[in-house]
Image (cartoon, helix red, strand yellow):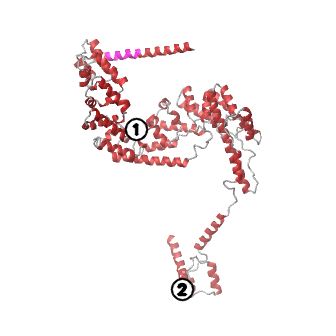
């Protein structure tokens, strides 16, 4: 078929080219006009009347003669379409003087109104009938007095009432502007007549109001404080239909009510699926904006379904109460995109590890970057969630592109093959810039600290937080160790085995440890740190000082023993150190003053019992002693807690 069309066009162009050549040869130096396809009617008319045409034209017309040229027909159709496109019905301009005057009339201040000012504002808003008077109940004073009657503190009631009033006034302005624009457009199209529009643009129906909304919330056993918090972050529920009414059952069958939303979000999700206590469920409602909306409640159900499909139990989700409100507010589609990225071939993260990762606090920054949550606490900006949807989508797509570059850099340039462990430990590594952050850190570790390229992936997998550390701060830590007497050739071994030291703070963490070691008589601090590098990250008050005080009681020369065996600070004080010394002193009756420190601690429990305590039962006696000692200590701790609890209770009763 295509070849037939090509043949037809070729046969048609042969006479056309010969005709144009004849016209060009007969012209007196004039430039040829723009080529146009010949009109078939003109050709037929000229042939019939014997008009002045060249012989070449007459000869060529006898080659092929179309009844109607297809090319000319398509040209005429396109021309007619362009002509019809220019003819449009008159429409209203985007902005004109009438619209500006109308907008200036709709400006209503959202400051607290008194009873008289409230009536004036309500009357100015409602000039079209009794339906608009319905909005007066949502003014500041009425809402505030209602919340105070429910036991809400005045400050909380004030904030909630301001938000509700601002929201309702803003909705009225939006509805009136929308109604005005529709009416203006219809008047322009119909010559000044606007048919088919309602007489007013009220927000709701006088059949229900604020009292009905609060009654529904009270039916679900919410307090005045809960209601005020909900009004503050989700003021739109005051304009929802409370429940389905029998007189309008047919019209309200498909309309979402507040009762439906509360049943879905509060009863089904929080109390039903998650099995939260009522106190915790109310706390989630107070801190989770958008949950008491149709979209938000369904999002919460979809997020729970998505998390359970990843192997996360509902019980574990219920335990993470700090991050649960934010998790329930996420977009399920955005969460699914992140899950797909983590499980893709680039990362190859096991699906069973994705759920626990998304549930933890460490992944909040990553999820916020690709699945942001918008909290609307300012009712004046009602469209804040949909104002920059395209810009936000562009930013998210750009973030995924950067994350892909980061993954490629870690796998191909750094050499990390098992990225799932790196991301599970440090999810924010995906947000780091590969060229500006990751590669400079890797270059410093290899070139300046002497960590070889083959060991670098293992070091970063052991402690991936190094990738987010500033190079200057790491350089300052290395210089600090050199000033303490650590040899430069030992730095690579220290940081290869204990890379977390590069993230410690010199002033708040390292300097107090060095000062304490110097106070207890350690002369060569650099050698001590080389033999026990993690000591620079220990707490002086909670870890080092108690161990030193105990060592001073059981050893005759504690400074000497500590200098010969710095690893003493790495053993647990109660579970290992104190238990072994008490067993030797009270059970075996062995004097511990002259026992070498490393002899007591360097062996395991069984070897300690056989080699140091000289037990012949394979360590069973020492194991029994350690177990009974632990049980006694747990009982003492329990008694201490109960005693403290009783003391607090008595003090409260005395104060009351």
Front residue of 118/274: it is 118
Magenta region, residue range? 625-636
Cα gap from disc 2 to disc 1, whole angstroms:
82 Å
Q: How many marks?
A: 2
Residue under the image location 51 percent in, 73 percent down: 6
Magenta stretch, overall SS: helix
Q: Quadrant of residue 202?
A: top right
Provide residue 323's location: percent of width, then percent of height: 49, 33
Q: Secondary structure at mark 1?
A: loop
Front residue of 201/384: it is 384
Q: Quadrant of residue 135?
A: top right
One can see residue 537 in this view: no
Locate residue 566 relative to residue 507 in the image: left or right.
Answer: left
One can see residue 425 in this view: yes
Residue position marked by numbered label 2 in the rendering: 25
Specify few, some or many for label 2: CA neighbours under 10 Å numbering under 14, 14-19, or 20 or more. few
Specify few, some or many for label 1: CA neighbours under 10 Å numbering under 14, 14-19, or 20 or more. many
User: Does the segment drawn in magenta span residue 627?
Assistant: yes
Provide residue 625's location: percent of width, then percent of height: 31, 15
Residue position marked by numbered label 1 in the rendering: 426
Residue under the image location 74 percent in, 35 percent down: 119
User: Does the segment drawn in magenta span residue 501?
Assistant: no
Pointers 2 and 1 in contact (C-beta within 8 Å): no
């Amino acid at each position: 078929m295509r070849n037939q069309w090509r043949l037809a066009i070729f046969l048609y162009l042969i006479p056309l080219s010969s005709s144009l050549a004849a016209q060009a040869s007969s012209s007196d130096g004039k430039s040829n006009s723009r080529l146009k396809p010949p009109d078939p009617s003109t050709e037929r008319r000229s042939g019939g009347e014997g008009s002045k045409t060249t012989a070449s034209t007459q000869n060529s017309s006898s080659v092929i003669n179309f009844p109607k040229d297809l090319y000319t027909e398509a040209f005429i159709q396109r021309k007619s379409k362009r002509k019809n496109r220019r003819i449009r019905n008159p429409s209203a301009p985007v902005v004109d003087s009438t619209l500006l005057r109308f907008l200036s009339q709709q400006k209503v201040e959202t400051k607290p109104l008194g009873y008289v000012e409230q009536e004036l504002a309500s009357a100015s808003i409602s000039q079209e009938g009794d339906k608009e008077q319905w909005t007066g109940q949502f003014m500041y004073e009425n809402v505030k007095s209602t919340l105070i009657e429910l036991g809400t503190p005045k400050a909380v009631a004030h904030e909630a009432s301001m938000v509700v009033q601002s929201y309702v006034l803003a909705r009225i302005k939006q509805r009136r502007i929308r109604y005005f624009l529709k009416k203006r457009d219809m008047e322009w199209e119909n010559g000044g007549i606007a048919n088919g529009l309602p007489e007013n643009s009220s927000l709701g129906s006088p059949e229900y109001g604020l009292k009905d909304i609060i009654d529904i919330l009270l039916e679900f056993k919410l307090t005045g404080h809960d209601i005020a918090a909900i009004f503050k972050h989700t003021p739109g529920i005051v304009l929802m239909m409370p429940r389905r009414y029998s007189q309008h059952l047919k019209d309200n069958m498909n309309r979402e009510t507040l009762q439906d939303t509360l049943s879905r979000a509060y009863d089904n999700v929080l109390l039903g699926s998650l099995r939260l206590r009522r106190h915790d469920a109310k706390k989630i409602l107070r801190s989770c904006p958008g949950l008491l909306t149709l979209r938000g409640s369904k999002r919460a159900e979809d997020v729970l379904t998505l998390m359970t499909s990843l192997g996360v139990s509902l019980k574990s989700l219920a335990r993470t109460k700090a991050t649960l409100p934010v998790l329930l507010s996420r977009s399920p589609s955005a969460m699914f995109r992140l899950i797909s990225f983590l499980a893709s071939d680039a990362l190859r993260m096991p699906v069973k590890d994705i759920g626990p990762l998304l549930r933890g606090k460490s992944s909040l920054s990553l999820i916020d970057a690709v699945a942001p949550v918008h909290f609307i606490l300012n009712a004046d900006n009602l469209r804040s969630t949909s104002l920059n949807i395209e810009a936000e989508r562009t930013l998210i797509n750009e973030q995924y592109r950067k994350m892909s570059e980061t993954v490629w850099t870690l796998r191909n340039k750094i050499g990390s093959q098992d990225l799932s462990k790196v991301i599970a430990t440090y999810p924010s590594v995906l947000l780091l810039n590969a060229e500006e952050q990751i590669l400079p850190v890797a270059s410093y570790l290899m070139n300046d600290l002497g960590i070889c390229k083959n060991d670098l992936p293992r070091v970063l997998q052991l402690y991936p937080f190094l990738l987010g550390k500033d190079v200057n701060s790491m350089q300052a830590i290395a210089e600090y160790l050199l000033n303490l007497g650590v040899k430069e050739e030992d730095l690579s071994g220290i940081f290869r085995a204990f890379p977390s030291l590069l993230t410690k703070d010199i002033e708040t963490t390292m300097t107090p440890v060095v000062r304490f070691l110097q106070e207890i008589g350690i002369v060569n601090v650099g050698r001590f740190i080389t033999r026990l590098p993690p000591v620079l990250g220990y707490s002086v008050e909670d870890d080092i000082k108690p161990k030193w005080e105990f060592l001073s009681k059981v050893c005759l020369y504690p400074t000497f023993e500590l200098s010969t065996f710095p690893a003493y600070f790495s053993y647990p004080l109660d579970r290992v150190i104190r238990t072994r010394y008490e067993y030797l002193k009270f059970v075996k009756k062995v004097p511990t003053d002259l026992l070498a420190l490393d002899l007591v601690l360097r062996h395991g429990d069984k070897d300690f019992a056989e080699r140091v305590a000289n037990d012949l039962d394979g360590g069973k006696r020492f194991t029994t002693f350690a177990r009974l000692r632990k049980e006694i200590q747990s009982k003492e701790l329990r008694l201490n807690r109960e005693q403290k609890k009783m003391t607090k209770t008595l003090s409260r009763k005395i104060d009351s």
